[in-house]
Structures are given as C-alpha cells and as structure tokens.
Amino acid sequence: MIYKQNAPQILAQIKKSSYPLLIAHENPDGDTLGASLALAQLLEKENKQFQHFCIDKAPSYFNFLPKIENIISAPNKINLQSHDLLIALDCGDLKRTGIAEDIQKIKTPNILVNIDHHQSNDFFGHLNLVIPQASSTSEIMYNFFKFHGLPIDKYMATNLLTGILTDTMNFTNAATTTESLKIASELLKVGARLNQIMSNIVKNKNFEVLKLWGNLLDKIEYNPEYNFAYTTITQKDLLAEQISAESVDGLANFLSNLQDTDFILVLSEEENDLIKVSLRTTKEDIDVSQLAKAFNGGGHKKAAGFKIAKPSPDNSDWKNPTINAIINKLRALNSELSRRDPFGIK
Ligand SMILES: [Mn+2]
C-alpha cells in the first residue's frame, strides 16, 4: 500500500534533510496553502532551516492562515541548488509548481517529493504520496502526521481544516466523505478555528463585491445543446467597481448551486490577454476535468479549469468566440459518445 510504504520514507527524508523547500502550486488555493503551511509548522518544530515557495501571491483573504507571511513568491529569493529536498504539495504535475524547468535543471543531488490527491497526478517525484480518494492534500497531511504520531497543534489544525473545507466546498461537493468529516471533527478538537476560517474565506464580501456579483449573475447565459450555464467577468467589470480579481473567486462555486444544468463555466478576462475558464459540476456522471484537460488545463472531476488565449488581444468581444471554441471541443469529445455523457464518464 502506497501510504504505508511511502509516508515513512518521506518522513525519513524530511528528518535527514538540512534545507528543505516546500512548494505550493501556482494560483494557490486553500488546500495547497493549508497542507504546505501545516508541514512548514512541523519543520519549524524540528528546528529545520527551510524555505516555503509559491510562485503566485496568495489571495489576501488567506492572510489569516498561520505563518502565511513566510511564503516567498519571488523566484530569485530561492536558490534551488541549495535545497537537498523539495516537497510539492497539491500539484497534479510538475508544471503546477510554476518552476518546473528550473527544477529539471538542478545539478546538485536532491530528492523531489510529490504529495497530492489529483486523479491526474503523473507521479513526477522520486517519492510520491498520491491518494486520489482523499478529499484534499490537507487530508493526506493529517493522516501523515497521525500515522507517525506527530502532534497536530491548533495552527496546523486551522491550516489543515482550511484545505479540507475549500476542496470540499464546505462539505457540499463529491469530495466530501465520512473520512473528511471525521478528520474535520478531529481538527476542531485540537483547536482549529472554524469561525475564523468561515469569516475569512466565505463571509468575506463587502457591498461593492456583492453588487458586482449581482451584475455577473445578471449576465448568466444558457447553452441548451450541452445544458450548461455560464457568465463572464471582464477587466472592465473589475475596474468599474475597483475590485480585485480575487473578490470573484467564489463565484464559480456559487453558480454550481444551479439546478438542472449539467455544469457551469465562469470565463474571466485576465490582464495578460488570457481567458481563465473555471468549470464546476455537481452531477455524479460528469467529469469536467476531461474538458479542462482537452484545453491543457487540469483539476478534479467536479472542479477544474484552464486558460486560453483571447481570440485577438484587442478584441473586446471575446465571449462568443471563446464559448464557440469550448462547444467545438465538446462536440469533438462527444463525437463517439451519447449526448448525455459529454465527458465520457459514467
Ligand atoms: Mn487540493
């Protein structure tokens, strides 16, 4: 069994290492942050010198997470050659670290550890602890600590519970299991701050943000061919209300409350002429990661995403061409399958 085999080897490498590097994935979410911060806490207790890296700065609503200020996001502040151990958390592939090419170029001997729960994980590490049945990487870390009898303090508990809550959409999506609920309860027992987590990552909207959400909800459209709903967020929407892109992070999750559609899409215009597409479904038999993968993106069956280039950079009408590109891809994916099974998963 992979867990019993690899978890002790990973702990042995951690104990042996003189200067580990923890890596959270690009565009960090609550799970990669929570899991890596909990592990950072262990390294501190072990009196290890280490660095904690994430190529993108975490959205500010995660600022309450214990020790998040120690995460470095400037690649020139880390020296990969100096680390004898690299641990990537919640990264489905090496690309998600945002520094894959640099990692591949390291000349000094090192061990790369891959701790993750994505079904699509390609086992890129020398040591891999990949458990797709886990709700989150934070759940894997919880079991990792428990397995080794390592104490979980209230700071680690808040970090781990944040990861479990965000990846299960507050225990509403298919990643919710008896195990994840049991672990959440254990984390509460050791001092995880549930109220603090909820008020920072869910109940965090102000007046301007809710007004913007109102506009975005007003723009919802429906595609009858593939039974999906979608909305778009433009740079203009954000500028008009002087709102940062992170204020609409929860919109895709909220839209997945829609009944009777098979899945939903949120298309967001980014500053760099890319369109970010977030996909969500609550339907048992639909796997939105198939569509994300077809566009070189990734994610989970129920929540996935990808980015595509704007049809033409100065073209303000990017919505229709983008939706058409998605529909064409769905038609291609669907060509040998029945209409009700657009992603090939039953
Ligand atoms: Mn995750």
Image (cartoon, rainbow, N blue to C red):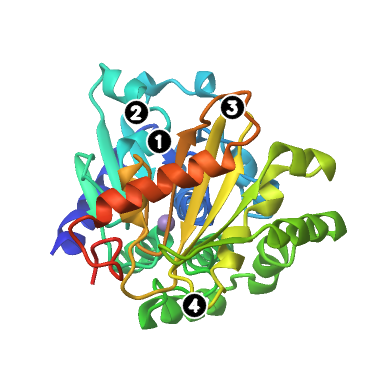
The residue that mark 1 highlights is: 97
Q: Give the mark nearest the N terminus, 3 or 2.
A: 2
Q: Which residue is mark 3?
A: 272
Where the C terminus falls, by quadrant?
bottom left
Q: Label 4 to label 3, Cα distance in Å?
A: 34 Å
Asked if the residue at tag 2 contacts the one at tag 1, i.e. Cβ–Cβ closer than 8 Å, the answer is yes
Q: Amino acid at mark 4?
A: Asp
| Callout 3 amino acid | Asn
| Residue occupied by mark 2 | 100
Foreground tag (1 vs 3): 3
What SS does tag 2 mark? Answer: helix
Whole-angstrom CA distance, mark 3 to mark 2, is 21 Å
- Is 249 or 178 nearer to us in this picture? 249
Lateral position of residue 190 relative to residue 282, left or right: right
The percent position of residue 183, horizontal first and vertical second, equals 43, 76
- Of circles 3 and 2, the one toward us is 3
Q: In whole angstroms, how far apart are the C-alphas of marks 1 and 2?
A: 6 Å
For badge 2, the amino acid type reads Ala
**Percent position (x, y) of residue 47?**
47, 43
